[in-house]
Image (spheres, rainbow, N blue to C red):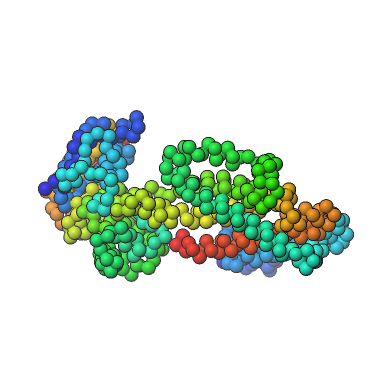
Amino acid sequence: MTHLQFDHVTKSFGAVPVVETPFNLAIDRHEFVVFLGPSGCGKTTLMRMIGGLDQPTSGEIRLEGEPVGAPDRRRGMVFQSYSSFPWLTVTQNVAFGLKYRNDLSEDEKAVRAERYLDLVGLYEFSDHFPSQVSGGMRQRIAIARTLAAGADVLLMDEPFGALDALRREQLQTELRRIQRRDAKTIVFVTHDVEEALFLADRVVVFSKRPTRIVAEIDVRSRLGEERSLEIRDGEDFFALRRETIGMVRAAAGGEL
Amino acid sequence: MSAVAETISRPEAAASPAAVARPRKRASRGLLRLRTPLPRGWGPAIAVGASVAIVLVWEFVARLGLTTPLFFPSPTAILSAMGRMFSDQHLLWHAWVSTLRVWGAFLLAAMLAIPIGVAMSGYRVIGAALEPAIDFIRYLPVPALVPLAIIWFGVGEETKIFLLWLGTFFQLVLLVADDMRRVPQEYVEIAYTVGANQGQVLKDVAFRAMLPGLVDNLRITLGWCWTYLIIAEIVAADSGLGFVIWAARRYMKTPEVMAGVVLIGVIGLATDQLLRLIHRRAFRYL
């Protein structure tokens, strides 16, 4: 069932076109889609438009059939940096996702915040400030906040880009687990091929500008739904990775 | 630091007994290395030590008769002048009057500058409309506007408050606008995507995010207020530290002039340290 739909979307900032050729894409409910492409190819802009943080110049994006408008808590954002508020403790940051909900009592909010804090393994750090925890933990705070807000679409803009390889792997595994468990639709932007393949049900490979889709890779049919570190070391993964890197290279037009 | 000095000096110390004096030399050269951190507790010790040394040298030079007391009185002469002024000339009251003027004008400037500055960088229309005028007025030297201030407000309290306000408000507006501009767009967007409205974004996120920078800028601006205060009080006043200093000058009472100046310095330093302390306490998360 289609959850999100890009319908002939184009975008320019003033006179500068970002997405010129009308962009079409349908994303299923509970699907993990990764936008993979060279820097500046417009993939982030397309994702931001889902969140209502940028408006398409023409065309339409539909969420459950309805055109998306201003940002709301159905579509949560996780950024690479400045992803949590430094003046709030870890718990307060997670609870911030619930701050503007009128349908829950303060007690319910506290319980919910704690649950998501636990889910991302930050319970013991609840009273720390973001400056006192690692970069990986800060990204977990952001994920927990978004989940606590009740978003059913997670929009993630290179959220693990600033982490070291080990933490990255760990968070990728966790994110995939959470996505399976909580049945979220995720749109994830990255330029890291391995990350894309490990996380995605489907990878959309973008060309450099003028932006268009070069390929769609059905990762689910190649690697299955469960992702573990063993899969990452397997033959199938390597083969897929080689293929994908080839596509990305071609798409970048020798500018990698 | 001491660990560094030890590792550097060890081979020589073993090689010859004459090297005993060397480690100290090496250590001091270490301190003058670009950006070398100071050992714990050395910072305040050096600050106090150097300040005391300057005063001592000054006292010594004055006592030797190398300076004319009329032009350059000794620190003790200044101190005793200050003591006399406390008892005979209501110096404390004058200081109080000046402090009230500074804080009155400062608060007025801050209360106007914060919302206007936030609005200027939050809403491009307002920024575009106000920035040229503010930038222009910002460069007008306050002393040049003294005659105008007197024409408008006479020589009463209003003139002083106006001049102080003039000197700080226009600077502060632009500083506040800058603080607001520096709030990461991500923070704003996070708030929107968890359902905040514009007012909530401003209050709960933008203002909170800019607060440490804002407090710092307020602290710096408060210092400028004292500069303009003296100008205002010299021109038109019968009270305040500026008046005291100017009156003492008329009779060439240099120790009293300097006592007034020193008192301003002391008040300024104390206020600054207090605000820094509050900053550290309030923004522990930084």
Residue B112 at x, y percent in the picture: 52, 50
Residue B199 at x, y percent in the picture: 37, 52
Q: Nearer the viewer, residue B67 or B9?
A: B67
Image quarter (top left, top right, bottom left or bottom right) of the N terminus of chain B: bottom right
Point 13% across, 46% down: residue: A2
Point 25% across, 50% down: residue: A75
Residue B160 at x, y percent in the picture: 66, 50
Q: Is residue B188 above or below residue A90?
A: above
Residue B271 at x, y percent in the picture: 61, 61
Point 18% across, 60% down: residue: A181
Q: Is residue B143 visible?
A: no
- Name the residue at the top extreme: A15
Q: Quadrant of residue A205?
A: top left
Q: Nearer the viewer, residue B262 or A247?
A: B262
Would you say B107 lies left or right of B82 here? left
Q: Nearer the viewer, residue A67 or A233?
A: A67
Q: How many marks?
A: 0
Would you say A20 lies left or right of B47 here? left
Point 32% across, 60% down: residue: A99
Q: Is residue A51 visible?
A: yes
Would you say A133 lies left or right of B235 here? left
